[in-house]
Image (cartoon, rainbow, N blue to C red):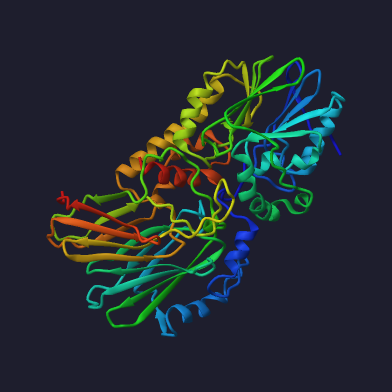
Amino acid sequence: MEPLHLDQVGPGVYAHTGEIALMTAANEGAIANLGVVIGNEGVAVVDTGGSVREGRRLLLAIRQITNKPILYVINTHGHPDHVFGNAAFTPPTVFVGSHNLPRDMLERGQYYLNSFRPAMGALLDEVKIVPPNVTVDNELQLNLGDRVLSLKAWRASHSATDLTVFDETTGVLFAGDLAFLRHIPVLDGSIRGWLKTIDELGKLPAKMVVPGHGPAPAPWPSGLDSERNYLERLQSDCRDLIKRGVPIATAAGLAAASENSHWSLFGDYNARNATAAYSELEWE
Amino acid sequence: MIGISFRVSVAIAIAVMMSLSFPRQSIAGDASDSWQEIAENVFNGRPLADGSNLIALEMPERAEDAAIVPVTMRANLTPGDTRIVRSITLVIDENPSPVAATFNVGPGVTMISTRVRVNSYTKVHAVAELSDDKLYAIETYVKAAGGCSAPMANNDEDEAVKLGQMRFRQFTASAARASAPREAQIMIHHPNNSGLQRDQVSLLYIPLFIVRQLRVWQGDQLVLEMDGGISISENPNIRFSYLPNGASAFRVEAIDTKGEVFKGEWPVEPAT
């Protein structure tokens, strides 16, 4: 087994850049960006990837850098490409996530496993849905000895379980899927919530961001610009289509169509984003 | 990111669904055998004629979001055909309770659009009863999964909107004649819990809680009546065509499964 490729983005801070793709057996589900922060007392892992195999490869990569204990696995939200590798990490590692994550995993975990079976095959045999044993209501600080990670749970935005991880020492922000670059943003929460969150998130005194998908690290806060443009376009197009009385099925093919050339996987997600945004915004 | 609907289910919910109402196959792609049995149950064995020249059923081939799948039914009677459509029953064959809704329609209603939950790859049927007392069926196929047990929409921006709050929209008619067909839309804010979703705190199943009947009048004339089932999406939303009858107001009444009645009235907007 080959260790996962990690780039150093700051002293003691590493990131793996996932492939911009849908999860498949061929890519082992390794499509999300993952993070590692090493303190003098131990290690925090930010997301574990889309298969236990990817999680093991991440652990192998960490072991090439340090033998310190893995104190925490932090899940930035509940989507499979970020949590299916959790079972590669075992107690006494503590799992940390949004206060909404336990119920989200219970509601959706088995369904995700069933749904990804055709694409991922036997790679899912080992996957276990591992919920957090420590949850974050609003903010929480994790001490790694000589450095502190500040965790913050957000309102429904990209999803209902979004959580960011900020390394105070280096100013690196792990934004999870609150930040997308190149990979079209995917809406599974609230478009208005997400735009509000982006405004607040952009005020964090970060120096750079590791997005959930796309090149890492990215400049801060300008790394949020293209995503904000997309979501604002989606929102204003949906509002306009609703105002003009265009039915939702037609609107799904029209909203944010002008953004097509800016994003990968546009055809896979844009119409669904539009459906979700339209049905939210028509109640404004 | 991931390539399926996020509004999803758990295996146990699927198991519960499979035990309900009508025996059927729930394996994706293998939807061939359910229809005959459903049709016999729902329509009491009445014969179903081919409706493909009389009615149309429009759904996306692949649902973008299984909890919000747009569906449009149209009456396409040829000019000169003196029959009218009395009702259309929408059946989502592989859903836990296949009858999504029955729409009884007033004169001049030739189009009904709504949004439904679709739980697995399934055939969908629309069965129209015409004024000749016969039933006519058409069929389409939709790829979607997990819609019935999808958790409530993930946004908390709408907390100010009250249960049962209604919105009524009338769409501008461009035709010169005041009697030309127009379209209107009724939206009602209601969780329409399918009984297959879990409470987010207790993790117990949320009891069935749906809008079971919704009626729209133009003046004193009933334009549309929906008897709804669990497959109608959260915040039921129906768009329909109608013929203006000169009345000055629309009136809407909805009743949910707790017996609560929601009412609204809106002046008819002039055509422009």
Where residue A98 sits: x, y (%)? Answer: 61, 35
Task: From the viewer's perspective, tell me whether residue B33 is left or right of residue B245.
Answer: right
Which residue does the image show at 60% across and 66% down from the upper left?
Answer: B29
Quadrant of the frame with the N terminus of chain B: top right
Say whether residue B217 is visible. yes
Where residue A227 sits: x, y (%)? Answer: 52, 30
- Decide which of A22, B184 is in the foreground and name it: B184
Which residue does the image show at 20% across and 51% down from the upper left?
Answer: B266
Where residue A95 sits: x, y (%)? Answer: 72, 35
Q: Is residue A67 above or below residue B120?
A: above
Q: Is residue B173 above or below residue A178?
A: below
Q: How many numbered marks have been drawn onto this rendered protein structure? A: 0
Say whether residue B28 is visible. no
Task: From the viewer's perspective, tell me whether residue A202 is left or right of residue A14.
Answer: left
- Decide which of B172, A142 is in the foreground and name it: A142
Which residue does the image show at 26% across and 56% down from the upper left?
Answer: B183
Q: Quadrant of residue B181?
A: bottom left
Task: From the viewer's perspective, tell me whether residue A201 is left or right of residue A2.
Answer: left
- Decide which of B255, A187 is in the foreground and name it: B255
Which residue does the image show at 19% across and 66% down from the upper left?
Answer: B221
Q: Is residue A52 above or below residue B232?
A: above
Where residue B248 sits: x, y (%)? Answer: 13, 56
Q: Is residue A207 above or below residue B109?
A: above
